[in-house]
Amino acid sequence: MILFERPTLEKILREKEGQLFDFKSARLDHREVAAHFVAFANADGGLLAIGIEKDGTITGVNEYEAQVNAFLQAAWNLCVPPVMIAHKFVDCVNHNGKADRIMLIEVAPGRKLHATSKDEVYLRIGDQSRKLTFDERLQLAYDRGDASWESTLIPDFSLDELDKGLLQRYRRMCGTSLSSERLLVARNLAEQKKDEIILNRAGVLLFAKNPYRWFPRADVRFLRYEGTVAETGPRMNLVKDIRLDLPLPKLLDEAFRVVSSQLREFTRLVKGGKFETTLEYPVFAWQEAISNVVIHRAYNITGTDIQVKMFDDRLEVESPGKLPGLVRLHNMHEMHFSRNPLIARIMTEMKYMRDFGEGVDRMIREMKAMGLEPPVFEEYAFMFRVTLRNNLEKRQLRQTAMPIVEDKRLANLNERQKKAVSHLQRTGRITVEEYLKLNPGITDRTARRDLNSLSDLKMVKIVGSTKDRYYIWAGL
């Protein structure tokens, strides 16, 4: 639900309480409602549905007119600074069978730290509005300064530079009848200045045809290395270097496409003589890692870009800026804070951001389900990095371990030859050069002897002369 465009009771009841939504009774004290306003404003904004109990019972608001007025006044009188809200009523039938109404109150993300009139600070974390400690409040106040960066207007930006097709896509997802320009204003991505609409930095990053013109380092750089370390000079092993500079939704679409095209598949022989194919990394894990850094990076750090580095044994995703707000490496599972609340809200509505709190836990679960190590999260200097390891060595050994029961020839192979069998099962062929890369530190003579031994066992067939010889998989 967005902007209260054509809301229905059915839509409201389908919503789940979480980071952006909450049900509240109209009997609630207006001071408690003010605490929820503050919590939403200090996070990513959100929506309160007043007149619905926690168990889903519809009690409505018609019998609580004084309370309803107090709720609306609380955003101004009981929040410091005042919280920006908008409200709308939706017709319903209450639990007594009488005509009634639900009141929807949308809270905009704040640009400053908000507190209640009692000088208490709250933050929305999952489906709870949590009161912060003094130290947490200080940290939040410090990091809240970053939020003003995305709200800064760009007077020289022309509306002709907007990606109209992308904006139309967003409008359809919102189900709104507002024009594109009015929608940008309503979502705090632009401001009306007399007869002119001026976009802010968040709006330009999200919907400009060429945000690179305004933010030269707000791109994603994909780097593919051959091997497990990044070499330089004569030994340079960089085989792909792709820069992506697009509006953020399209940036993620293209980043997903590029990374997906470079991922390998692993094939192993399982019981019954059939081959089973698994992906190099779980799709959710690597897409979540990239989505999070694009949405939450510190765009005010202009000296570098987001880098996605693919090595033979791992995928690294690096982003400018350490973890924001109250989020730390030890509490990433339960804590949420958006450095860029305006961007985060739009990307959530466009389905690029999963349910809050789901990401890290699900990444770990899906890596574990594939037999891989959990993601590694690190901070260094002014950067944040996520590393996914493909456990290449273990997976190759596992691929060869199962067929041993089927073919006694495998029991006599050395570890180098077992790696080659795994490679052959995936690709169908191998050269001496590829064998040397799988087994660094051995000589050409040892490699040829190992491969010729596989030929003697009738596991491979030799193709070509000695100079350009390669070996093809003959099966088990």
Image (cartoon, rainbow, N blue to C red):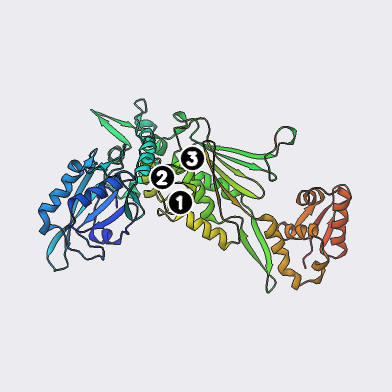
Mark 1 vs mark 3, CA separation in Å = 14 Å
Q: Residue at x 73, y 69 (%)?
A: 403
Could you tell me which secondary element the residue under label 2 belongs to?
Answer: loop
> Quick one: 130 or 430, which is closer to the camera?
130
Could you tell me which secondary element the residue under label 1 belongs to?
Answer: helix
Question: Mark 3 is on which residue type?
Answer: Lys
Callout 2–callout 1 Cβ contact below 8 Å: yes
Label whose residue precedes the other's in the sequence (2 or 1): 2
Q: In the rendered image, which residue does mark 3 sit on?
A: 322
> Quick one: 224 or 83, which is closer to the camera?
83
Determine whether, in the image, residue 129 is placed left or right of residue 51. Answer: right
Could you tell me residue 432's position as x and y percent? Answer: 82, 50
Could you tell me residue 254's position as x and y percent? Answer: 51, 44
Determine whether, in the image, residue 160 is placed left or right of residue 54. Answer: right
Whether residue 400 is situated above or below residue 126 in the rendered picture: below
Whether residue 331 is situated above or below residue 410 in the rendered picture: above
- Can you name the residue that lies furthest to the front here? 134
> Which quadrant: the C terminus?
bottom right
Residue 453 appearing in the image:
yes
The tag on residue 326 is 2
Mark 3 vs mark 2, CA separation in Å = 11 Å
